[in-house]
Amino acid sequence: MPDDLMRYDLLAQNALKGVVREALRIAETTGLPGDHHFFIAFNTRAPGVELSDKIAARYPREMTIVLQHQYWNLRVHDDHFEVELSFDNVPEHLVIPFDAVKGFLDPAVQFGLQFEAQPAHSRPREVEAPKPAAAAKTELQPAPAAAIEDAPAERPAQDEAAKVVSLDQFRKK
């Protein structure tokens, strides 16, 4: 079988990350329509990920956030997104490069995507161009997932706590 020098597998993953980016842009500009909400799993050690030391220690490998009722200041850029969530009633600002995203799920319509980590040397040339968050990723074992529900422009009430969920309940077996 001939070598795939075009790396269509990586080109397809990059295109599907564009679906995630556009879904987040819709949420950024118009809010989440209907019952749509997003579970986003990401590698907390990936280059360009920004979270507090407390959250990084709590989720040293992977974390899943939920954008639904309690999120604010969602900003979507070409190579990353930013969002504020509440963890144990403490607001936190997260910066997540799209290259760090490992999974995306909208359970309202049973739509999900899963991404594989790829070493930098196996990326197509156009992806190798220097970008702030385009460095190599390593395959990590999943850690407990955290989920935060979103609230458009207001902070959550003091008695509301973050929920921990697992994406496994949404995966087909």
Image (cartoon, helix red, strand yellow):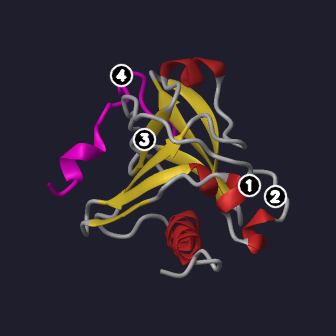
Q: Position of residue 74 (x, y in %)?
A: 60, 54
**Mark 4 vs 2, N-terminal side:** 2
Q: What secondary structure is found at the residue carrying circle 1? A: loop
**Disc 3/disc 4 C-alpha distance (Å):** 22 Å
Q: What secondary structure is found at the residue carrying circle 3? A: strand
Q: Label 1 belongs to which residue?
A: 134
**Mark 3 vs 1, N-terminal side:** 3
Q: Label 2 belongs to which residue?
A: 131
- Give neighbour class at mark 4: few <14, some 14-19, many 20+ (Cα, 10 Å): few
Callout 1–callout 2 Cβ contact below 8 Å:
yes
Main secondary structure of the magenta stretch: loop
Q: Residue at x 49, y 20 (%)?
A: 58
**Mark 3 vs 4, N-terminal side:** 3
Q: Quadrant of residue 148?
A: top left
- Along the horizontal axis of the image, is 100 left or right of 64? right
**Mark 2 vs 3, N-terminal side:** 3
Rendered image: mark on residue 159: 4
**Disc 1/disc 4 C-alpha distance (Å):** 39 Å
Instruction: Check residue 71 for magenta coloring.
Output: no
- Give neighbour class at mark 3: few <14, some 14-19, many 20+ (Cα, 10 Å): many
Q: Label 3 belongs to which residue?
A: 64
- The stretch of residues the image draws in magenta is 153-173
**Closer to the camera: disc 3 or disc 1?**
1
80 over 33 or under it: above or below: above
User: Residue 37: in sight, yes or no?
Assistant: no
Q: Amino acid at mark 1?
A: Ala
Q: Position of residue 129 (x, y in %)?
A: 83, 65
- Give neighbour class at mark 1: few <14, some 14-19, many 20+ (Cα, 10 Å): some
**Disc 4/disc 2 C-alpha distance (Å):** 41 Å
